[in-house]
């Protein structure tokens, strides 16, 4: 009986544990400035292994990754493990965790015409408009030179994301390969203004804090949660999101009824000043679904 009771206690304890949240690589976390209001994380090692990424995103151009690869000569598919974009709402820096210890990397940077200059003992390659700094053999940062200097200035004082940001990150599950957390302030999302997602920049102006995450392991699953200043503001966003989804549904060709049903898997709910958008698209429809929202590659 004692063994049975102990086994039951262990089982109940396991069931009562809080779900694990996404983790930031410690080498990147300790570089996050204290005034950060937006974090966007990508777990490349896991993301690149999903068939959804290979079919729908491998051919899409991501300027920050392209610039990092061009400046350093690395292969993003082999040498990058994790990316973290940090922003204070005015300037941003892309942090990268990967294999930067190649002895040929610095000569590659110089061959690409990147001038070399130093700041507080770290070597930077590029110019004031855009540069890359190798923090150590597995960590690099890319951005405007002024933003990189600020990052270096704060490096010794950072203990990781500020507390409000940590609170938001706890809402993001460990299995998410792509995620973002926002704690307030003006921000502009890099979506094509002519696409359906371009309307999200107008919606963002009413949001105080929020998170979004995607899991591409099997199909396209995701959740966006946002807190607004008032119930009325949340109602407006709820209406805008439902209208946006309705426009997407109307864009579906008549000969693809299954794709129209995929829009029924997008649920928008409001609870006071809080908004939730849940997405669950089966794998066979993801390609068509993303083409409608993001455009072709």
Image (cartoon, rainbow, N blue to C red):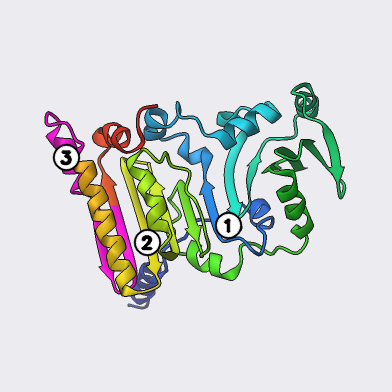
Q: Mark 3 touching mark 2, by CB under 8 A?
A: no
Q: Residue 268 — which label?
A: none
Answer with mark 2 or mark 1, whichever residue precedes in sequence: 1
95 displayed left or right of 211? right
Given residues 231 and 270, the one toward you in this image is 231
Residues at marks 3 and 1, CA–CA distance in whole angstroms = 36 Å
Q: Position of residue 159 (x, y in %)?
A: 69, 64
Residues at marks 3 and 2, CA–CA distance in whole angstroms = 24 Å
Instruction: Point out the image quarter for the N terminus.
Output: bottom left
Q: Specify the quadrant of the image occupied by residue 248.
A: top left
Rendered view: 276 above or below 230: above
Which tag is nearer the camera, tag 3 or tag 1?
A: 1
Q: Would you name the residue on which mark 2 appears?
A: 225
Q: What SS does tag 2 mark?
A: strand
Binning the other alpha carbons within 10 Å of mark 2 as few (below 14), some (14 to 19) or many (20 upward) gives many
Q: Position of residue 289 (x, y in %)?
A: 27, 37
Q: Which residues are magenta?
A: 250-278
89 displayed left or right of 249? right
Q: What SS does tag 3 mark?
A: helix
Q: Would you name the residue on which mark 3 appears?
A: 260
Q: Measuring 31% from the left and 61% from the top, which residue is drawn there?
A: 237
Q: Would you name the residue on which mark 1 appears?
A: 89
Residues at marks 2 and 1, CA–CA distance in whole angstroms = 19 Å
Q: Specify the quadrant of the image occupied by residue 166.
A: bottom right
Q: What SS does tag 1 mark?
A: loop
């Amino acid at each position: 009986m004692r063994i049975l009771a102990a086994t039951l206690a262990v089982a109940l304890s396991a069931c009562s544990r809080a779900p694990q949240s996404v983790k930031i690589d410690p080498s990147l976390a300790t570089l996050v400035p204290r005034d950060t209001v937006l974090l966007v994380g990508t777990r490349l090692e896991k993301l690149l292994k999903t068939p959804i990424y290979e079919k729908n995103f491998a051919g899409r151009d991501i300027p920050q990754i392209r610039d990092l690869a061009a400046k350093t000569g690395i292969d993003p598919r082999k040498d990058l493990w994790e990316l973290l974009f940090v922003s204070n709402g005015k300037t941003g820096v892309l942090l990268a965790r990967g294999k930067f210890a190649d002895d040929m990397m610095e000569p590659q940077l110089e061959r690409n015409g990147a001038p070399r200059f130093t700041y507080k003992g770290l070597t930077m390659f590029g110019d004031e408009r855009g540069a890359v700094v190798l923090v150590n053999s597995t960590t690099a940062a890319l951005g405007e030179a002024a933003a990189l200097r600020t990052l270096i200035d704060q490096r010794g004082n950072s203990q990781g994301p500020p507390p409000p940001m940590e609170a938001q990150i706890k809402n993001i599950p460990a299995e998410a390969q792509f995620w973002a957390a926002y704690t307030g302030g003006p921000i502009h999302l890099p979506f094509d203004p002519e696409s359906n997602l371009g309307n999200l920049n107008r919606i963002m102006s009413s949001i105080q804090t929020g998170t979004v995450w995607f899991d591409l392991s099997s199909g396209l699953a995701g959740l966006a949660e946002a807190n607004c200043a008032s119930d009325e503001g949340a109602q407006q966003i709820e209406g805008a999101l439902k209208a946006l989804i309705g426009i997407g549904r109307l864009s579906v060709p008549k000969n693809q009824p299954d794709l129209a049903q995929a829009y029924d898997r997008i649920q928008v709910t409001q609870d006071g000043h809080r908004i939730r958008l849940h997405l669950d698209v089966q794998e066979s429809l993801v390609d068509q679904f993303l083409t409608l929202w993001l455009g072709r590659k």
